[in-house]
Image (tube, rainbow, N blue to C red):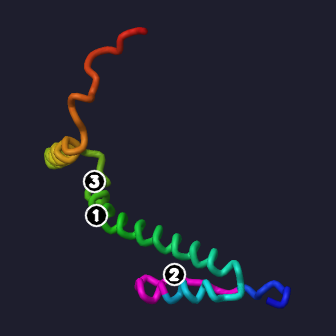
Amino acid sequence: MDGETPKGGTVVSVSHPTANAVANQAAHIDPNPNRILAKDCADRIAAALKDATEADETWAPKLKALQAHNDLTVSDADWADVHDDQQALQKVASDYLDKSAIPEGKPQPR
């Protein structure tokens, strides 16, 4: 370099692995030493957005199904829905929780 601060620029993260690899190579040969850091930031942001989108696509419909109706009355159908939700939660939780690890009774004073 000629001792001057290189001009700024724009970096992007590309979702296609081959295209992203080419962009990474370009960042390494750019005279601006900050380009590779900026490219790394762009890749991290893109990965976080991808993860968030996947989580949203997975969980948004399930959370929407759990929303209460806009009325104040609790019908038999509402209680049946609560019961179904509780059974589904217990089934999923039992796959992850070990019942023997749950303490029983009152804690003993030390």
Looking at the image, the residue that sits furthest to the right is 3
Q: Is 59 positioned to the left or the right of 77 in the image?
A: right
**Which span is picked out in magenta?**
9-21
Say whether residue 87 is magenta: no
Q: Residues within 10 Å of mark 1 (few under 14, many from 20)?
A: few
Tag 3 residue:
66
Q: Is 9 positioned to the left or the right of 47 in the image?
A: right
Prevalent SS, magenta region: loop
Q: Which mark is residue 21?
A: none
Tag 2 residue:
13
Q: Is residue 4 visible?
A: yes
Query: Distance from label 1 to label 3 (Cα)?
Result: 9 Å
Which residue is located at x 30 percent, y 64 percent? 58
Tag 1 residue:
61
Which residue is located at x 49 percent, y 74 percent? 46
Kindly check if marks 1 and 2 are in contact, taking CB atoms under 8 A apart as contact: no
Mark 3 belongs to which amino acid? Answer: Leu
Q: Is residue 45 above or below residue 27?
A: above
